[in-house]
Amino acid sequence: MIKNRVQLAGAARAVLLACGALLALASAGCATVRPEQRAILADPTMQFDAQSADQAALDHALDNREGSTGGGSVRGGGCGCN
């Protein structure tokens, strides 16, 4: 009987510790941003780009194939024969 109480107390302590850790993690992700800071955070350089390495490799291959660099972000234009 005493063994079951010790195990029950240990399990309750583990659950309480897990809830505390979860609460600490959840509260760490919250941040208050002032309105004047939002313009800085919305800058395109602050955006996460997961494909940057892949895009750099693709741009390098296209530059070698075409024999020129740049102009990758321009759409349309020219004589329209594409």
Image (cartoon, grey):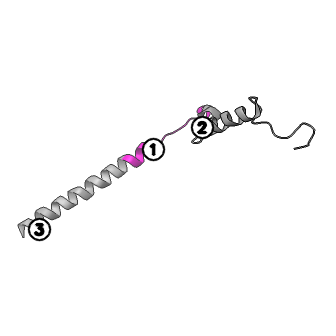
**x, y (%) of residue 46?**
59, 34
Sooner in the amino-acid sequence: mark 2 or mark 1: 1
Q: In which quadrant of the rendered image does the C terminus lie?
A: top right
Looking at numbered disc 1 in the image, what kind of residue is underneath it? Gly
Sooner in the amino-acid sequence: mark 2 or mark 3: 3
Residue 79 counted in the magenta span: no
Q: In which quadrant of the rendered image does the N terminus lie?
A: bottom left
Residue of label 1: 29
Cα distance between the residues tagged 1 and 3:
38 Å
Looking at numbered disc 3 in the image, what kind of residue is underneath it? Asn
Secondary structure of the residue carrying tag 3 is: helix
Q: Is residue 44 visible?
A: yes
**x, y (%) of residue 18?**
29, 54
Give the residue displayed 76% in from the left and 34% down from the top.
66
Which residues are drawn in magenta?
25-38
**x, y (%) of residue 32?**
51, 39
Give the residue displayed 11% in from the left and 62% down from the top.
6
Residue 39, image quadrant:
top right
Secondary structure of the residue carrying tag 1 is: loop
Give the residue displayed 49% in from the left and 40% down from the top.
31
Left-right relation of 30 to 76? left
Residue 75, image quadrant:
top right
Q: For the residues labelled 1 and 3, say whether their Cβ atoms are less than 8 Å apart.
A: no
